[in-house]
Amino acid sequence: MKFIRKIYRIIELLLHAAIIYLFLKPRYLIFGIETVSHYLRLCKSLRLTKRILIAFGAKIGKRDIRIGPYIYMHNAFFKNDFSNLCIGEDVYIGPHTVLDLYGEITIKNHVAIGMNSHIFTHASFVGTYSMLMRIKVANVVFEEYSGTNPCVTVLAGVTVGRNSYITPHSVAVENIPPYKIVRGNPAQIIANLPEEKMKSFETKYLEKIGWIKS
């Protein structure tokens, strides 16, 4: 079984390389990064999604990465690549998540972002006076062990603190301190998490996934 699995992985790797370098790269040179973003919206394979992101500039860790499927990379055309995306290790990004790459998105180790979430790095205005208003661009950071439930919106400039969580359908408009649970629109702190206990949970979690030995 191990031999068959190894052969399958080799075939998969060759197929993914063909998709990236024979199919997507030529189209990227002609039409730009938006054609790659469109492909990612339709891509069902988590491993292929990761490989495409790396091939077009994203910085992604090696271990335990689960991204997608059906990820929407928004505003990548400003830099014509995915270099504004930096993802650590042991990260989960759920299906149909929108990542706005106008500014930088940094997702550190052991972060989980629920499906159908929207992470924005810019804010603009529409209407009569939109041309007179400056577009706000600010980076978003998810510190280690932080996360969101499904259908969460994180606005430009927000840093989600270590071990902090955003409940479903909430809108984070300002920085969230470490060890907090927030809820609502705008998101407000509804609970404080015990720091020492959470650090103990971190150690147990790392043991469970095999990163450290007990």
Image (tube, rainbow, N blue to C red):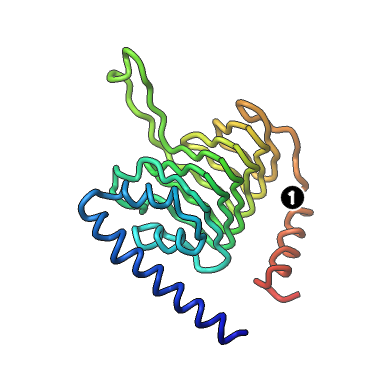
Q: Which residue is mark 1?
A: 195
**Residue density around tag 1, few if under 14, some if 14–19, many if 20 or more, within 10 Å:** some
Please state, as top left, top right, bottom left or bottom right, where the C terminus lies in the image. Answer: bottom right
In the rendered view, tell whether residue 141 sits above or below residue 208.
above
Q: Along the line of sight, which residue is nearer the eye, 113 or 107? A: 113
In the rendered view, tell whether residue 171 sits above or below residue 78.
above
Position in image of residue 161 (x %, y %): 61, 45
Rendered residue at 51%/46% (across/down): 141
Rendered residue at 59%/37% (across/down): 152
Disc 1, SS: helix
Please state, as top left, top right, bottom left or bottom right, where the N terminus lies in the image. Answer: bottom right
Q: In the drawing, does residue 14 fall left or right of residue 4?
A: left
Name the quadrant containing residue 209: bottom right
Q: In the drawing, does residue 119 fall left or right of residue 162?
A: left
Q: In the drawing, does residue 87 fall left or right of residue 189?
A: left
Rendered residue at 26%/54% (across/down): 28
Position in image of residue 33 (x %, y %): 30, 50
In the rendered view, tell whether residue 100 sits above or below residue 143.
above
Q: Along the line of sight, which residue is nearer the eye, 13 or 147? A: 13
Kindly identify the amino acid type of the residue bearing the numbered disc 1: Glu
